[in-house]
Image: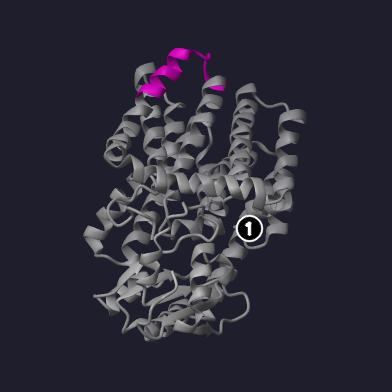
Amino acid sequence: MIEGMDLKTLWMPPLYFFYSSIFVQIFGSTLFAVRFGSIFASILCIFPILGIAKKMGITEKSKLFLVSILLTDILFFKISSTARMESLCLFFSMTSLYLLYTDLTDFQKYFFSGFFLGLGTISHPFGFVFSFLAVVVISFRSSFAFKKLFLMAFGGIIPLLGWGIYIVPNFDIFILQFGAQLGRKKDLLVSVFTLVTKIKIILSGFKYPIAKLISLVLLAALLLNLIKYRKLDFEIKKNIIVHTLCLSIVIGFIFLSSESWYVYYIIPFLSILLCLVFEYGNQIEKGLVSLFLIYNLVIIGIFINTNFILNSTKDLQEAYFNEIYQYTKNSKKVYLQAIPDPYFYLSEKNINIDMREFIPGELPLPEEFPVKEMASQDLFIFYNEDLIHPFLKIFLQNNSDLYDRYEINVPTPKGYEYKLFAIIYRKKHKNTLLL
């Protein structure tokens, strides 16, 4: 519904879209294709993370623990299987950090580290945060020099120039689309989210937030004990400090951006820190860290049991999508803001349907919002009435007599991940609308 989106998608950096198109070419235009692309990228993330652990002198047993703690994390599991940019961005960003641990020449190390940072940034803007982590790693692993930063910047600017070439011919559209995202962040941080809300957002991705908070406090205590009271090699203590600082920077940026999706980026650093305690801690500390793995296994076991054994997520979702389809099967133009998203299901069922995807309700847009485009829609679908864009809400209120309102509510069991609920506004007839 945003101007120019049907011509060029400048809402986000482009690399994720190019990457996903490879899987769409292989598997077809399906939800499986783009989800598989994200899963594949998350598996690739394991290699630079293990590479960093190996460079820190971690043994095979501890590396196995690192992979186990990473792959059993419920947030890593969920976001890796979601059609989003985080996995690809994390792979490029962690590869960038791994290169800083290698024994390559200065040019190879810093140029290619910057290049991968650039690739991470044009996968998702959060990739830029890893440039701060790179500075931390450089500062602790070698003497700090502007030459190194210059080589990194030189490498990083190449992917960004590629994005720039994509932007320049449509700069006005870019300012509208990407600018709206930035405006949304500003409004959320300044006027919407409180301090407590921001903390809740950081913990919200985990199944049991309070338990996760307790586990983070425990990890902090274990790390402090290792650094302060244990007679460990200076290099080992340095590694703990570096990754604690990296974790702190990432959490800080998540706090500033206030996006629950971004919590995904803390998991590698949590996993590395847990691995360091497992490698260098005493028997009691190793036992306490092992509780993290048991916790992960219990949580992921509950998740799988609830969603795939006791209940069939596929069948519940199919029922939800089918109910939506019954209202849309005779519609040509549909505005879609539903979670889970039935886009691919509806596209397959009705090849002539023209869908406009959702706009977050809080997104700031210019006054010349495309009212005619809104008026041309046959049907509107929302999963949460509070998240309807204010312009859309006014439009529907002004024309309430011209729309029938329906609700879909597929019953879900206790503990189920989603509420399968939707509100539908379907146009009654072709009378004049109040614009």
Q: Which residue is mark 1?
A: 204
Q: Give the colour scheme shown.
A: one colour
In which quadrant of the rendered view does residue 419 lie? bottom right
Q: Decide which of 216, 64 is in the foreground and name it.
A: 216
Magenta stretch encompasses residue 143: yes
In which quadrant of the rendered view does residue 434 lie? bottom left
**Amino acid identity at mark 1:** Ser
Q: Viewed as shown, does residue 287 lie left or right of 320?
A: right
Q: Secondary structure at mark 1?
A: helix
Q: Residue at x 28, y 49 (%)?
A: 18
* Horizontal and vertical percent position of residue 73: 56, 56
* Horizontal and vertical percent position of residue 128: 47, 35
Magenta span: predominant SS is helix
Q: Residue at x 32, y 80 (%)?
A: 331
- Considering every residue shown, the one lying at the far left of the view is 25
Q: Dividing the image into 4 quarters, which one contains the C terminus?
A: bottom left
Q: Residue at x 63, y 44 (%)?
A: 255
* Horizontal and vertical percent position of residue 425: 46, 79
Task: Identify the magenta region.
Answer: 140-154
Q: Decide which of 220, 173 is in the foreground and name it.
A: 173
